[in-house]
Image: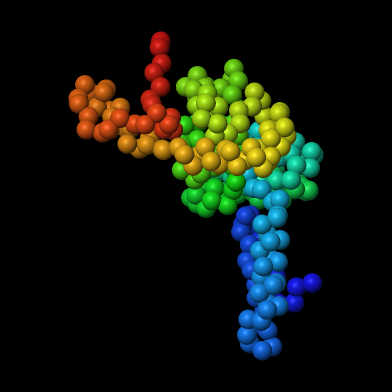
Amino acid sequence: MSEFVSVHLDSGHPGVGTLVLSRPPTNAMTRQVYREIEQAAADVSNCDDIAAVVLFGGHGSKVMFDITERLDAANVPVQLILICGRNEALAANLRARKWRMPVNVIGFTKEIHKWMRAADFLIGKPGPGSIAEAMVRKLPVLIECNSWTLPQERYNAEWVLEKRVGIVLHSFKEIVDGVRQMLEPAALTEFRKNVASQNNRAIFEIPEILAKLLGEPSSIPAAEPSQVPAKVPATHST
């Protein structure tokens, strides 16, 4: 039993813990305190708590409730950070439900980066913005792609598979198997390694794209082949 060292976790900030040291009577860092610090660090490193940030744009999506329900029923060992955006009804429904798993429901926020930093991977749609943000935050992704996926977003799913930076499901009805696959230590390690190797140059591609549209030469160097898909304006035929 630890006498001087303890670890405090806050459900409001998943993935973050505070190491609390009580001052020994002698006001010195004794061997016992050092041993307790080592044990606390070992205990934290062995925690299986993995957090996923669930993000479906600024207005959320009702599929977020279904995802949470399926993972909770299957008792999957993962924490969910559910960002509902301006969808107050969705946030209220999620908060009203008694979940067995750790769930943190977030409404509209300008601190998406903070919640992504607290997560280990992202669950969401295959939009270029979501995937690019996940790559910047070094998060593997778990997305869906099927006949209902927007044509301009299907390439993003292909890119995720090609670069092995995440998992692509045919339907979020398969979310339990998808998350369990993501939680496999070897798989998560490989995804993280592949994400870390990506070079997100999307911001530098915009001048290049505009220059091509205007028929002007560009001074921006060509992007490397491992880049994240950029947001290219979709064209529609009438």
Residue nearest the observer in this picture, 74 or 30: 30
Residue 39 drawn at (x, y percent): 70, 66
Residue 141 drawn at (x, y percent): 57, 36
Q: What residue do we see at 73% from left, 34% from top?
A: 176
Residue 76 drawn at (x, y percent): 75, 42
Q: Is residue 19 left or right of residue 57?
A: right
Q: Which quadrant holds the C terminus?
A: top left
Q: Which quadrant holds the N terminus?
A: bottom right
Rendered view: 189 above or below 234:
below
Rendered view: 74 above or below 50:
above
Q: Is residue 88 visible?
A: no
Q: What residue do we see at 38% from left, 26% from top?
A: 232
Image-quadrant location for residue 44: bottom right
Determine the residue located farthest toward the top in the rendered image: 238
Q: What residue do we see at 71% from left, 28% from top?
A: 173
Residue 106 drawn at (x, y percent): 60, 49
Rendered view: 72 above or below 16:
above
Q: What residue do we see at 66% from left, 48% from top?
A: 50
